[in-house]
Image (cartoon, grey):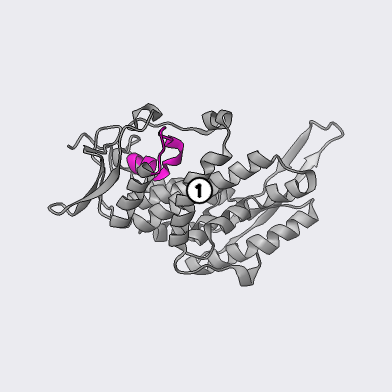
Amino acid sequence: MNSSDFRASNNDWYKALWNYHYLCTSITILMNVKLCQVLRRSFSGIPNAGNRFYEEARAVFEPAKEVYNIFLDKRRLVTPKQNPVKIHSEALALVVAEEWNMQKDELRTNLMRLTGLIFTAIDNPMSLEKSDVLSQVLQFLDKDTILYRLEENTNLLQLEETNWNPVVEWVNSEYGLSVRPNSFRMKSSWIMSDISIIFPEAVIANDSRIRLANQLSCYNFLQLIGLQYATESLKSVFLTLATVSHRLHVDEAVELALLEQKYQSDIWGKVEWAHDIEREELISRLSAGVLLVHLGDLESEYGTKSQEKKL
């Protein structure tokens, strides 16, 4: 990707939705049984990741409260703390219901990312405030994947500058920042095991941190949960912001996040199933996070404190 390719349509969130829907189905084919057991992350509120116990999941509008409830047949979906899942956005409610409809005979909790994120936002088990989640996002500025380059490998350095610099430049321009990437070097002795890596800090002015924090604070608690999830997946604030802002497609952002890995794989070869699964996992995770940012703008009631049972 070069500067001329650094773009995306205004319907990028719809492509993310399609990616998410497609990947939640196709990733089950890519994973073998043993790897499924390793990657699976179960969460309470879904009956022990057991067999599917319902025929149909539906988003049902409740006019009196102007919210959508998710029903599994006649059973209303609740969180691990028994809070009902109430969603103001019709699009978000439909996507969550579709997650449940996509399940086969066995509930695959590792593929129900939006449900898990919404459960977390509603129950808020760590009693997080918006500022806490925002801080978690901003922490990745100091270790952002695309802000650090390896000096010794000139070919890789050129590849990183060609592909990553347009993203850095766009985010700087769009958000009014003045962040400059930096490079690092590896220092080794005659003893092969004695290798140290010197990481210089990227140049991030304090006013840039404040300016970015102020702009991201316009997101509500649920949207920040999605933003944090996407950022943590890519290990990059810059790639996440470019994706959320429609400047990168989801698959492009993942390719850029895995740029160094692909470079090394082209030289030394790759483990087909492992690298392919990692890529599909990242696309799925990023799609879920981006969708939550775009579709969660009406969910202002989440957050502030751990929720008690409200049936």
Residue 202 visible here: no
Label 1 sits on a secondary structure element that is helix
Question: At which x and y percent is residue 256?
Answer: 62, 55
Q: Amino acid at mark 1?
A: Leu
Where does residue 249 sit, x and y in percent of width and height?
A: 53, 61
Q: Is residue 104 magenta?
A: yes
Q: Residue at x 37, y 27 (%)?
A: 48
Q: Position of residue 30 (x, y in %)?
A: 58, 40
Residue behind mark 1: 23
Q: Residue furthest bottom?
A: 4
Q: Which residues are magenta?
A: 102-120
Q: Which image quadrant is residue 118 in?
A: top left
Position of residue 186 relative to residue 163, above or below, is above
Asked whether residue 121 appears in the rendered view, the answer is yes
Residue 266 placed where, x, y %?
76, 49
203 lies left or right of 136: right
Residue in the foreground of this view, choosing between 207 and 172: 172
Q: Going by the image, does 111 lie left or right of 197? A: left
